[in-house]
Amino acid sequence: MDNLESTRSSNFITNIIDKDISNNKNDSRVHTRFPPEPNGYLHIGHAKSICLNFGLAKTYNGKCNLRYDDTNPSREEVEYVDSMIEDIRWLGFDWEDRLFYASNYFDTLYEYAVKLIEDGNAFVCDLTADQIREYRGTLTEPGKESPHRNRTVEENLDLFKKMRDGEFEDGSRVLRAKIDMTSGNLNMRDPVIYRILHANHHNTGDKWCIYPMYDWAHGQSDSIEGITHSLCDISFEAHRPLYDWCIDKLDIHHPQQIEFARLNISYTVLSKRKLRELVEGNYVADWDDPRMPTLSGLKRRGYTPVSIRNFCDRIGVAKKESIVAVADLEFSIREDLNKHSPRVLAVLNPLKVIIDNYPDDQVEEMDAINNPEDESAGSRKIPFSKELYIEKEDFREDPPKKYFRLAPGKEVRLRYGYFITCTDFIKDDNGEVIEVHCTYDPESRGGSSPDGRKVKGTIHWVSAEHAIEAEVRLYDRLFMAYDPLNVEEGHDFKENINTNSLEVITALVEPSLKEAKPGSRYQFERRGYYCVDSKDSTNEKLVFNRTVTLRDTWAKLEKANK
Ligand code: ATP
Ligand code: MG
């Protein structure tokens, strides 16, 4: 795989794996898995886990499975299953023939539960969900044993079978592991491992009306697949004793669960459930809205797989949660696009310029370099003519000191064009400048100085006659708050939404972009990186998404405010 450096550097996880290998544990195999629940679209937080799991497998010449943790039929959809496959492939990872579904293990998981019952390690409980919660106790008080805890093995086997055969209603009974109601770890106080749910499942249809809980399905699925190192986020640390208990009681292959800190990003929300709220509440257009931190949103925004992998590599893995600056993610995409994206001229806020001494019908083809960072990208021609457009902000009637762009009497270089000097300008009734008149120096073709005289400013332009219109979507951050989920009681994270996160304008772009393919990425010189929208751009109407500005304008703002 190209450019994949992930997890080459050592960290606490590679230390564990190195030690396991030196002890010949699991015959020195390394086998990981990425286990998403298909209840939404994957986001950049998942990318961290994907890069870690697939990256470790690659580093150690091992394997990584893709496994859908599809044990909750009420929230899961085939659309999500399909999107996840697409997104992981896009990121550049391959599970070969190892695409698995926890739901394919339902028979085995059922048999395992029967074994627990037979060994006296599980019982059917008739308490309601509320009662179970009440009986569980708290961190400071021990729990109380269920009155059904001492049912006989025969009775438990019979009731569990009847649960499976659909004889009971949803919520009327559960299967619980029999562990220790006084344990200091609440997860060990006779946790529920099966519940009744008469629901259609995307994979198993109506075959089952009982479904295993996460804690019963996850470790056993890891074991069935021969996973050696089961990486999960830190919120599962307190579940590890239960993970180990189940596997020990079943006496099956024992993977090692290892926890690492989740990725959090400033001004960003990473949780499928919260992201779904944004989609369902129409705060964004869809899961792949370019403002979303989903992989499909980032892709549509113009992010490259390499930039995301590099980002995940740079942030590393640790045990302690922290918030990574969104600027670090933006740095990664700028770095990649700077190396690889062709430069083009595009004017976002057009102001007409007329070169009075330029021949009326003349059109010249000017040579323009496609990418100064990459000689092999070659060059192209851009038409130059008497009437051009420049950016409104590149002209000032009363320029401040050190303004090196166009102003009355001032000379600038048109990128790949000529030196021009402003001689006059015209305003409309509102006093807004609508036309600038200039003369050009025919000796400065290509933008080089004819006599060594210095011109400080270089501005971009398009030929009025040849430019094409394009819709440009200027995206900004979706949230105003550094940590959007950190809200006071009675408030909702959606109150932190930036209501100005999208501005749509009509820009004029150089004619070479007529052929621009959906998904292709460019640097608009002096303006930033832009990507042809993969959904809405057509031959008739070009649509660009702003991926990122050239510089971190927020950091500049924050500095200015200090
Ligand atoms: P979400 O709250 O977004 O649904 P989740 O943890 O419930 O997250 P899963 O589909 O269960 O989502 O996650 C699949 C894998 O991705 C898990 O191993 C989980 O630990 C990991 N993961 C999810 N979010 C992050 C994150 N922000 N940083 C790192 N890993 C993550
Ligand atoms: Mg989840």
Image: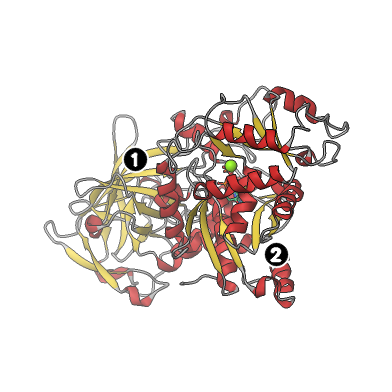
Query: On residue 505, which mark appears?
Result: 1
Q: Callout 1, which amino acid?
A: Ile
What's the distance in space between the residues labelled 1 and 2, CA to CA? 48 Å
Classify residue 335 as left or right of residue 546.
right
Rendering coords of residue 186 (x, y %) = 79, 38
Considering the image in quadrants, where does the C terminus appear?
A: top right
Image x and y of residue 464, in percent? 21, 51
The three-letter code of the residue at mark 2 reads Ile
Q: Is residue 6 visible?
A: no
Helix, strand or loop at disc 2? helix
| In front of the other: 291 or 384 | 291
- Image side of residue 490 versus residue 306, left or right: right
Numbered disc total: 2
* Residue 123 placement (x, y as % from top left): 71, 36
Looking at the picture, how far across and down is residue 457, in whole percent? 42, 60
Residue at numbered disc 2: 13
Q: Earlier in the sequence, mark 1 or mark 2?
A: 2
Is the image coloured rainbow, by chain, by secondary structure, or in one colour?
secondary structure
Name the residue nearer the viewer: 214 or 395: 214
**Secondary structure at numbered mark 1:** strand
* 234 lies left or right of 341: right
Q: Relative to 327, is 63 above or below?
A: below
- Residue drawn at the location 19% of the way across and 46% of the way down: 540
Establish if 154 lies above or below 263. above
Instruction: Give the numbered dot on residue 94.
Output: none
